[in-house]
Amino acid sequence: MALELEPIALPGVSTDRPMLIAGPCSAETEEQVMETAKELAANGVKIYRAGIWKPRTKPGGFEGVGVEALSWLKKVKKETGMYTATEVATAKHVYEALKYGVDLLWIGARTTANPFAVQEIADALQGVDIPVLIKNPVNPDLELWIGAIERVHNAGLRRIGVIHRGFSSYDKKIYRNSPQWHLPVELKRRYPNLPMFCDPSHIGGKRDLILPLSQQAMDMQFDGLIIESHCNPDCAWSDKDQQVTPATLKELMGKLVIRDMAQSTESLADLRQQIDEIDNQLFETLARRMRVSEEIGMYKKEHNITILQTTRYDEILQKGVKLGASLGLSEGFMRVFLEAVHEESVRKQMDIMNK
């Protein structure tokens, strides 16, 4: 589906990268909201975010102040001139946020995963011209993410963007949510004009990961960042470990290197030609490997041997990972690559077995 999109433009907000949205995870008290907003405004931040309704994984935690906190955001607009943004998860949230003049809305990861909830929000936004950002769903499902975008687009909205906040994973050794950068990259490939923001706070889950993740996003031509900032992060009522003070945020943004997207790439032509030639050789080699797999499949069929030989597969995997490491290729890449090759080999042998 082709998308008719317009920039996430707000008067007085620079379109230079990165467009920055910042503020606390949760609006806790009027004093906390105002103090954080004033410090951010003094540092040049134009768009203030705060969670009004906070869906939590388990009941019993702080789930947001609710409608009362919207009056605090209205006060932020009046006293600082900042635009305000918050998350909505139901039609009622949409109506209340619009009533209090919120300037930008986003749909959270849990909500994006539920087409019924997204459609309810889209219906509530019919006839409203407001920027809407859509976070990726909790699980790595690109089509579900695109479906949410299309539902909002079908409601008549055109200032639509997305937020990459990472995907849930059991492995949380490094990140709170696995980045899986290839998914937003594929989304951008399909919709080049779709504004894309990165949420390093939720991907990393730790303050010291905000800068490297932000830099990665900028190097991958993301349009903006949405970062959690609190006047006193250590005392935050939710997600304290991933929030930074406005002063720290200013320091981090000052360290970002913003590379020129429009610079001529003529000097890369020779190197890109080399890449194309190597890719052609690689694909031809893979095709030869698959032909050998087919021959193995024919042999197994003739001799009534099962397709899956786990000992042999483990041998290929271990040897491949070791060889890859000696050639400077990461273990993670080699495992994904070899698993994909093995899956295709098994598929071809299955076709032969079932003929």
Image (cartoon, rainbow, N blue to C red):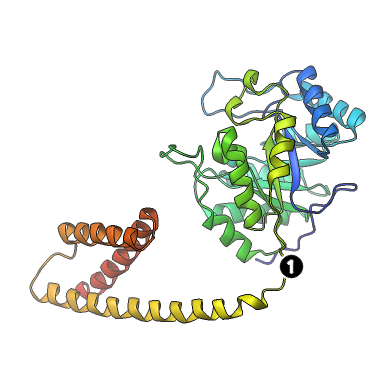
Please report the residue visible at 35 percent of the width from the left and 63 percent of the height from the top.
327
Q: Position of residue 32 (x, y in %)?
A: 76, 20
Left-right relation of 64 to 180? right
Q: Where is residue 126 drawn, in percent x and y? A: 78, 48
Residue at 43% in and 81% down? 280
Q: Is residue 11 left or right of residue 312?
A: right
Q: Nearer the viewer, residue 125 or 229?
A: 229
- Residue depicted at x 85% and y 28%: 76
- In this rendering, the answer to whether 151 lies above or below 37 is below
Residue at 66% x, 63% y: name it.
191
Q: Position of residue 179 (x, y in %)?
A: 52, 48
**The N terminus - image quarter:** bottom right
- In the figure, is residue 301 to the left or right of 275? left
How packed mark 1 is, by other alpha carbons closer than 10 Å (few <14, some 14-19, many 20 or more), is: few
Q: Amino acid at mark 1?
A: Ala
Query: In the picture provided, is 203 more to the left or to the right than 313?
Result: right
304 in relation to 96, above or below: below
On the image, numbered disc 1 is attached to which residue?
Answer: 262
Q: Residue 125's x, y, as percent?
A: 77, 45
Quarter where residue 147 is shown: bottom right
In this orientation, does residue 66 appear? yes
